Image (cartoon, rainbow, N blue to C red):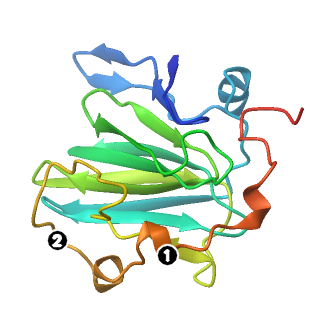
């Protein structure tokens, strides 16, 4: 397994070892000890799965309390996966980073608490599976507009399929940033 630290603190691209033969392939999607030994400490409490059609954009979503780390995998198709740093104390506050995830390479994206998440479907359809570190709570779910001008995300699409909530999400400049993320270590780090 190879883990690459990306520019946003705590954001990691994971390339698991995949065994291929004439029958197909096998890989471990998650092994708590192996991930913890490589700096990903999280107690995942819920698994989610979604299917989206080509041209769909979902996001940019996050849970304000207690926050929610995610481990995202693309099981079918190809997506362009985006994370935005919404931690006010972070040196990369307001910056974004994107990676392509697909079913062929089996890469994963670990998104720590304090980053908003969204994705765009590039293939005819895509199935995502993602583990989360806290249970879904509609009262603390928040969303930032996918095409926010201050974030200036270079989405590979101009006219996406969106749900009403994502069409009407708040702008980044109007977001109330949660205080509880301040001075909290990023998952995968220890407090100083």
Residue density around tag 2, few if under 14, some if 14–19, many if 20 or more, within 10 Å: some
Q: What percent of the width, then of the height, locates residue 69?
A: 62, 51
- Name the quarter where the C terminus is drawn: top right
Q: Nearer the viewer, mark 2 or mark 1?
A: 1
Which label sits on residue 174? 1
Q: Does residue 157 sit above or below 25 in this rendering? A: below
Q: Residue at x 60, y 35 (%)?
A: 9
> Residue 91 occupies which quadrant of the picture?
top right
Q: What percent of the width, then of the height, locates residue 15?
A: 43, 22
Residue density around tag 1, few if under 14, some if 14–19, many if 20 or more, within 10 Å: few
In depth, the one of 3 and 94 nearer the eye is 94
Q: Residue at x 63, y 67 (%)?
A: 177
Determine whether the residue tagged by mark 1 lies in a helix, strand or loop: helix
**Callout count:** 2
Residue corresponding to mark 2: 161
Q: Does residue 168 sit above or below 190 in this rendering? A: below
Which label sits on residue 93? none
Q: Residue at x 65, y 28 (%)?
A: 35
Whole-number angstrom distance, CA of label 2 to CA of label 1: 24 Å
> Residue 40 occupies which quadrant of the picture?
top right
In depth, the one of 115 and 51 nearer the eye is 115
Q: Residue at x 45, y 45 (%)?
A: 95
In depth, the one of 136 and 19 nearer the eye is 136
Q: Earlier in the sequence, mark 2 or mark 1?
A: 2
> Residue 37 occupies which quadrant of the picture?
top right
Taking 9 as reference, is 53 left or right?
left
């Amino acid at each position: 397994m190879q883990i690459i630290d990306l520019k946003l603190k705590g954001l990691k691209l994971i390339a698991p070892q995949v065994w291929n033969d004439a029958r197909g392939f096998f890989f471990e999607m998650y092994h708590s000890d192996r991930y913890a030994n490589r700096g990903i400490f999280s107690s995942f409490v819920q698994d989610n799965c979604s299917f989206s059609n080509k041209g769909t954009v979902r996001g940019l979503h996050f849970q304000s309390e207690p926050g929610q780390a995610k481990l995202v995998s693309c099981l079918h198709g190809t997506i362009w996966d985006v994370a935005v740093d919404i931690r006010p104390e972070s040196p990369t506050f307001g910056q974004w980073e994107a990676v392509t995830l697909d079913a062929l390479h089996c890469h994963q994206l670990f998104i720590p608490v304090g980053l908003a998440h969204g994705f765009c479907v590039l293939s005819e359809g895509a199935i995502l599976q993602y583990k989360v570190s806290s249970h879904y709570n509609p009262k603390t779910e928040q969303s930032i507009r996918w095409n926010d001008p201050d974030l200036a995300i270079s989405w590979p699409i101009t006219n996406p399929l969106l749900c009403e909530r994502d069409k009407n999400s708040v702008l980044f400049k109007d977001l109330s940033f949660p205080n509880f993320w301040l001075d909290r270590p990023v998952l995968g780090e220890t407090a100083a």
